[in-house]
Image: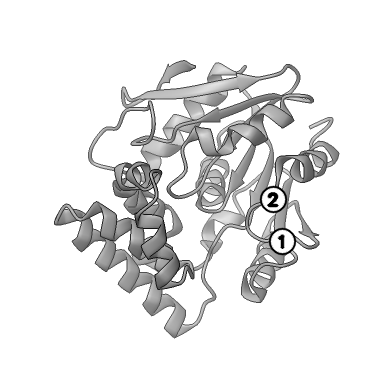
Amino acid sequence: MHKVTSPDGTSIAYERFGTGPPLILVAGALCDRAVIRPHAERLGERFTAVCYDRRGRGDSGDTAPYEVEREIGDLGALVAEVGGAAAVYGHSSGAGLALHAAAAGLPITALVLHEPPYTPDEAEDRHVAREYARELESLLAAGRRGDAAALFMATVGTPPEVIDGMRAEPWWAGAEAMAPTLAYDSAVMGDLTRGGTVPGELLGKVAAPTLVLCGGASYGWMIDMGRRIAAALPDGRYRVLDGHEHVVPPEELAPVLAEFLPGR
């Protein structure tokens, strides 16, 4: 494990695997670097693959108050650490953060957005996203971290009986520890400010060639959202990974990234 210091003084823990062009992996909600490490290890066969603990998770520090710009600074510090420019892969809400970073002008050579979970631009969907953000804030303010994590699981479609089983698992304590960062992901996705819809004002600012990935077995609205995002990017392209859902195994994902990223 290595550490780098963000512009606001926060210590960010990371690991690197392999040699070659630098590629930074950004994980989604309730995920630390251990979750995405298998992907980094596999990608280390072709790249210098970096996985890290986003602030407030694992071995990284945190600095209040939270701002999306601070997380952009964390990613910028990692880019500087690996040579001053890097490709970036973001998964789920991590893709939302990667989009913010690219639009902010970080030296990102190529960008992969893997199922950023923006909501459809419909009144009911915007309402659900805003209500989630408000309830999440209330639960965290009351110190109910387990309930906050359960709220997130329910919001992404996990059945109640499955959540009950999850809460009895040994790993649930780790989810509770990371629960405050759910508010960070909610801010990244614009749940309260935009109702979780696509930040159109950011898309036109992305200079890097960008690949948007969706699983062919994912929700139809997610697949359609990915197609729309790719079409709105200045240099966007779109690919459906047949038979896959939201999470793709390392051995399936690595060749897709290798095909897109060489020479970038």
Which residue bears the numbered disc 1?
215
For label 1, the SS is strand
Percent position of residue 134, x then y: 26, 67
Q: CA distance from mark 1 to mark 2?
A: 8 Å
Name the residue nearer the viewer: 129 or 51: 51
- Dots 1, 2 in contact, CB < 8 A: yes
Name the residue nearer the viewer: 191 or 33: 33
Percent position of residue 167, x then y: 35, 56
Residue 129 visible in this rendered orientation of the protein = yes
Reply above or below: 241 against 60. below
Q: Earlier in the sequence, mark 1 or mark 2?
A: 1
Q: Residue at x 44, y 18 (%)?
A: 4
Reply above or below: 4 against 75. above
Q: Residue at x 73, y 64 (%)?
A: 231
* Res 218 quadrant in image: bottom right
Q: Residues within 10 Å of mark 2 (few under 14, many from 20)?
A: some
Name the residue nearer the viewer: 15 or 75: 15
Q: Residues within 10 Å of mark 1 (few under 14, many from 20)?
A: many
Reply above or below: 217 against 263. below
Query: Which amino acid type is marked by label 1?
Result: Gly
Percent position of residue 224, x then y: 68, 72
Protein image colouring: one colour
Give the quadrant of the C terminus.
top right
Q: Is residue 258 left or right of residue 42?
A: right
For label 2, the SS is loop
Reply above or below: 194 against 127. above
Q: Is residue 195 left or right of residue 10?
A: right
Q: Residue at x 40, y 44 (%)?
A: 171
Query: Which amino acid type is marked by label 2?
Result: Val
Q: Residue at x 52, y 77 (%)?
A: 121
Which residue bears the numbered disc 2?
248
